[in-house]
Image (spheres, rainbow, N blue to C red):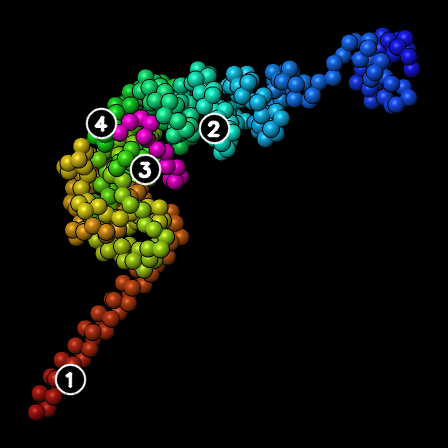
């Protein structure tokens, strides 16, 4: 096939250049002829990808975008494309439907932050990241990228402080809270309240916005650690009004948020952080004794897990600004009458104040099989005590009757 034949074939519209190249062989020399006709220069694959990068990623569907980007990053020949085209990538990721990938920019940064090469890319493009993200994603971005460099940390702290209301709003905007149709207004209304609470905690703990760490171990609320304090934001407590006991760690504050119709829809709680139970110290018999102690004092606890147990501080009293404070029990949903013996440092305490009932409550919800097992064991022990008590009383009665008979015979 000569040049004339090739042009005729192309002009007919029946064959593409790609199809012609597919037919190429040593005899036809089609690629060589095409190069002469169109003055084509052969380019390496990475150059072709770079030249057409924007078109490529905009033709990707949302679900496969991150995979393609990380495939390019994984190959050393195309890794530089990720860095040089970072603004385009951020713009494309910002347009991804959140139903496909939640916070795609942060997801991408997490993947990059797992490798030294990825960290370098983040460093070189961090100002661009800050420019391109929604401020509602700022806290999550900070959780992913803090500690990479002092320059990044300084920039993040400045951004978090300047956008504290948006940050507070993003913390409230959790799937664990159902706000209904008034969501946008409720977020706006309570953002200032939450921001004020956080800033007071930061002052008390001599901490900063950047030092707030998310600890996502609770299924019912998002937990944030601020040095020696915990901030919990989540769904309503199943049991807001609960018995007061020394074994239950009292929060500094515990409030329910109310919507425009007067309905409660979320709970915010601040409490002292306590040391968790180590795996080697997880003594099941000791845990049962704690449960039995509560039951003896008329309290039922149905959400028994090791995540809900901690080690009591030296003084089991809420503190703020380094000083113990008196919290009115009713203001945090506790009854006024505190039961239980005084604790000492090292004793176990309940850290999650949900699913705790007075024994006379008629609507007890059992959250864990372990709680049900403990309750069955405790009930069996009570029945055994009653039987032994009855047996003892019966023996005393029998002895008294025998003594009376003996005296009469005498």
254 w.r.t. 23: above or below: below
Check disc 2 and report the residue beneath it. 119
Q: Give whichever of discs 3 and 1 has the lower sequence position.
A: 3
Residue farthest along the bottom direction in this orientation: 410
Residue 245 in view, yes or no = no
The percent position of residue 182, horizontal first and vertical second, equals: 38, 20
Q: Secondary structure at mark 3?
A: loop
Does the segment drawn in magenta span residue 216?
Answer: yes
Q: Is residue 149 left or right of residue 107?
A: left
Q: Give whichever of discs 4 and 1 has the lower sequence position.
A: 4
The quadrant where residue 397 appears = bottom left
Q: Secondary structure at mark 4?
A: helix
> Which residue is rendered at x = 58% and y = 21% of the image?
81
Q: Mark 4 to mark 3: distance in Å?
A: 28 Å
- Of badges 4 and 3, nearer the viewer stands 4
Q: Mark 3 to mark 2: distance in Å?
A: 41 Å
> Which residue is rendered at x = 31% and y = 26% of the image?
209
Find out whether the residues at labels 4 and 3 contact each other: C-beta distance under 8 Å: no
The percent position of residue 179, horizontal first and vertical second, equals: 38, 26
Find out whether the residues at labels 3 and 1 contact each other: C-beta distance under 8 Å: no
Q: Which residues are magenta?
A: 207-222
Check disc 3 and report the residue beneath it. 237
Q: Mark 3 to mark 1: distance in Å?
A: 59 Å
Where, quadrant-wise, is the C terminus in this rendering?
A: bottom left
Q: Is residue 202 left or right of residue 4?
A: left
- Of badges 3 and 2, nearer the viewer stands 2
């Amino acid at each position: 096939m000569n040049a004339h034949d090739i042009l005729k074939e192309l002009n007919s519209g029946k064959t593409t250049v790609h199809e012609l190249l597919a037919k190429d062989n040593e005899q036809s020399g089609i690629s060589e002829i095409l190069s002469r006709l169109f003055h084509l220069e052969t380019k390496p694959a990475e150059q072709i990808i770079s030249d057409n990068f924007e078109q490529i990623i905009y033709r990707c569907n949302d679900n496969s975008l991150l995979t393609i980007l990380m495939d390019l990053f994984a190959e050393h020949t195309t890794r530089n494309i990720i860095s040089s085209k970072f603004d385009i990538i951020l713009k494309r990721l910002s347009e991804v439907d959140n139903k496909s990938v939640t916070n795609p920019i942060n997801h991408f940064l997490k993947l990059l932050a797992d490798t030294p090469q990825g960290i370098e890319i983040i460093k070189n493009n961090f100002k661009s990241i800050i420019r391109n993200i929604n401020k509602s994603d700022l806290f999550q971005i900070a959780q992913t990228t803090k500690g990479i460099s002092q320059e990044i940390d300084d920039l993040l702290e400045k951004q978090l402080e300047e956008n504290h209301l948006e940050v507070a709003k993003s913390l409230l905007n959790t799937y664990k809270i159902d706000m209904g149709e008034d969501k946008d207004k409720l977020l706006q209304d309570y953002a200032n309240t939450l921001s004020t609470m956080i800033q007071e905690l930061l002052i008390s703990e001599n901490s900063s916005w950047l030092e707030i760490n998310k600890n996502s171990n609770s299924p019912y609320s998002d937990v944030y650690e601020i040095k020696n304090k915990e901030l919990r934001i989540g769904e309503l407590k199943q049991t807001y009004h609960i018995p007061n006991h020394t074994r239950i760690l009292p929060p500094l504050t515990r409030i329910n948020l109310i919507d425009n119709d007067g309905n409660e829809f979320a709970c915010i709680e601040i409490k002292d952080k306590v040391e968790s139970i180590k795996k080697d110290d997880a003594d099941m018999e000791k845990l049962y004794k704690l449960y039995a102690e509560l039951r003896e004092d008329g309290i039922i606890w149905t959400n028994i897990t090791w995540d809900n147990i901690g080690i009591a501080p030296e003084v089991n009293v809420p503190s703020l600004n380094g000083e113990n404070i008196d919290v009115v029990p009713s203001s945090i949903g506790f009854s006024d009458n505190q039961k239980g013996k005084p604790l000492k440092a090292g004793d176990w305490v309940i850290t999650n104040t949900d699913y705790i009932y007075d024994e006379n409550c008629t609507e007890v919800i059992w959250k864990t099989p372990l709680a049900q097992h403990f309750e069955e064991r405790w009930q069996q022990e009570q029945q055994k005590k009653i039987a032994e008590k009855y047996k003892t009383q019966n023996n005393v009665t029998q002895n008294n009757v025998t003594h009376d008979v003996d005296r009469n015979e005498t």
